[in-house]
Each structure stands twice: as structure tokens, then as C-alpha cells.
Image (spheres, rainbow, N blue to C red):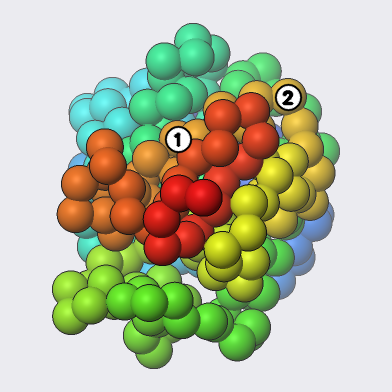
Amino acid sequence: MKILLVEDDSRIAEVIAVAFSVRWPEAEMVSTSLGQEAIIKVETEHPDLMVLDLGLPDIDGFDVLKQVRLFSTVPIIILTARDEESSIVKGLEWGADDYIIKPFRQLELMSRAQALMRRYHLISQVAIPDYRDLHFGQSAHQLFVGKRQVSLTSNEVVLLTHLMRNAEKVVPTSRLADAIWGMDYPGSHEAIRVYIHRLRIKIEDDPNHPQYIHTYPRVGYSLQEKQL
Ligand code: CA
């Protein structure tokens, strides 16, 4: 397993590297303090996980996220001091799998990283369903909408496959949170709303008038032919 750490504060980078080496002694750490270099390293090193700081000396971490998501579904955890809700939503909207605010507890980072790796590996093993025009390619990250191919991040795969297995039923938001994080934590419903929005942009012809994923306010979401 290879972890790419993008962090310009050497003290924090050191703490994170030590925490990972204790939890996953076999993990290889690759690190950089620069955003541009981070993008290149995702391409050349093929990391299994990326921990991304937002305040970097060259380009903003959001730009790193945006560019990486153009070609990679690598699991990404944003680790930043920016705690405004708009920042969190933007991070999730642009394809981060998780968002942790500094100062953070090492234990929290480790358990979130572990949960993310677990679902990333799980989704490559489970049988993946089809639904109407939606079917998966060789990997669970590769979805075909008719003939059009889109790539999905780990959380999007978990959400969509969960909705597919429960097609035509309304799935409560708390159950979707449970499917992603193994629990329903404060803020998770907002994060799911953002992920659903991203999924719609990828699969719907018109995300504002969805034909696949329907919202049931204060209840949950449903993958179905049309509104009940
Ligand atoms: Ca920084």
C-alpha cells in the first residue's frame, strides 16, 4: 500500500507519517509539499490513498483535487485548518472522499483512513448490479450510462450500488451514511446531499430534473423510474 501525503508543514507531515507507519508498517509513504508535484505523483506513483492539505505554497489544494479527479479515483482525504462549511461542501463536491479539520486527532485520521481503504477494497470485490441504462465496466469505478463512460469515486460507488440494490425503494439517508462510514455522524446527511448532487451531474441528462435518483425530503433517496 502506498500513501501520498501532500503537506507543507513538515511538523504535521512527520506526525502523519509516524501515525501511518505505526498503523500500517508495510505502507510506503510518498510525500510532497507542493500541489503541482502532488498531481504528477498521483500519475506516476499510483498511490492507494492521498492525504491532502489545502493551503499549499504553490497552488491551492482545491486545484490539486480538481485536477486529480480528472484522471484518478484514488481515495482522497482532505486534511485542513479550513473549517467553514462552504469549504467542506466544496471539497466533497469536487470529489474528496473525506474531510478532516485541523487540529486533528491521529486516531481520527487513522480510523477514517482505514474506513476509506476498507470500502475502497470492498467495492472491488462485491458483485455490482446493473440498473436500466447504468452498468459498471471492468472496475466499480467505471460506470457506463448507456454508452457514455463516467468515473466514480469510492463514496459515489458505495452510494450508487446501495441504491441499485434497493432500486424502486426509498433508502433512508441514515442508511446511506451507514453504508459509507459505518455510522451516521453529524454532518453526514449534508455530505450525502453533496455526493448525490455529484452523482446526478455524472449520470443524469439534466441534474435538476433527475430521471434516476429521486429525493424524498427528510426521508432519503430512491433510484427509480419515476416519482411514486
Ligand atoms: Ca498548509
Element type where label 2 sits in the image: loop
Which residue shows up at 27% across the image and 42% down it? 209
Q: Nearer the viewer, residue 202 or 15?
A: 202
Provide residue 69's location: percent of width, then percent of height: 29, 53
Residue type of the residue flagged with mark 1: Val
Determine whether, in the image, residue 176 is placed left or right of residue 60: right
Determine whether, in the image, residue 9 is placed left or right of residue 205: right
Question: In the rendered image, which quarter is residue 101 located in?
Answer: top right
Question: In the rendered image, which quarter is residue 35 located in?
Answer: top left
Specify the quadrant that holds the N terminus: bottom right
Element type where label 1 sits in the image: helix
Q: Residue furthest top?
A: 84
Which residue shows up at 70% across the image and 71% down it? 26
- Marking on residue 27: none
- Marking on residue 186: 2
Residue type of the residue flagged with mark 2: Pro
Which residue shows up at 54% across the image and 82% down it? 128
Is residue 100 among the parts visible in the rendering?
A: no
In the displayed structure, would residue 1 be above or below residue 227? below
The earlier-in-sequence mark between 2 and 1 is: 2
Determine whether, in the image, residue 77 is placed left or right of residue 133: right
Provide residue 15's location: percent of width, then percent of height: 68, 35
Provide residue 121's location: percent of width, then percent of height: 63, 74
Q: CA distance from mark 2 to mark 1?
A: 15 Å
The residue to which callout 1 is attached is 194
In the displayed structure, would residue 186 be above or below residue 116? above
